[in-house]
Amino acid sequence: MRDRNALLLAAGYAPAYRQTPLDAEEMQPVRRALDRIVHGHEPFPALVVDRRWDLVTANRSALSILTEGVSGDLLAGPVNALRVTLHPDGLAPRIVNLTEWAEHLLDRLDRQIAASGDAGLVALAEELCSYPGVRRARAASNLAERLFVPLVLSSGAGELRFFGTVATFGTALDVTVAELAIESFFPADASTAAVISP
């Protein structure tokens, strides 16, 4: 493979990387690592999505907190995390700061589209923008002054405020692995931590 990649580079082409399905036997170590990461993040929500934002795995906290009240139709596979979050039959009615959170997610999606040119992601962005309360950011200046954009959810225990982090595999030589994103949510205030922590 090294010689082939050297030839491709010399000819002005990008090296060829394999793309292995996640359910392949050789990907089992990756699946185990992903499960260990998200389950190790308990009691806080964590999930893994692929390049199209389809759910790969999630921990119990993510499944209980982020799917409460979500229509079963949206939870039928493949489950798209952006659709579940922003759809009016999804998490959207519980998101207190829906416009701000949607702008944040669409900004991330637009950057991904700019880098990949993926027509499927373009169609997803158009679909998301058709949902009530969802739009692209008009001005980023007020967001740039903030430390992070919180996800604020209404719940029976009051408002829950989270901030998120995104992790990727930095040394992946497989396209499937390189395009995975691990989304971990942390309490953004003491009251959320008290509700979520045992």
Image (cartoon, helix red, strand yellow):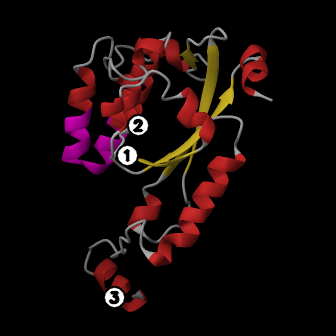
Q: Earlier in the sequence, mark 1 or mark 3?
A: 3
The residue under label 1 is 54
Q: Amino acid at mark 3?
A: Arg
Residue 4: in sight, yes or no?
A: yes
Which residue: 61% across, 40% down?
60
Badge 2 amino acid: Ala
| Of labels 1 and 3, the one closer to you | 1
Q: Position of residue 162 (x, y in %)?
A: 63, 24
User: Magenta stretch: residue 133 in it?
Assistant: no
The amino acid sitting under disc 1 is Asp
For the residues labelled 1 and 3, the Cα–Cα distance comes to 32 Å
Mark 3: secondary structure: helix
Q: Which residue is mark 2?
A: 81
Residue wearing tag 3:
4
How far apart in space, not on screen, are marks 2 and 3 (Cα)? 37 Å
User: Which part of the image, by quadrant, shows the N terminus?
Assistant: bottom left
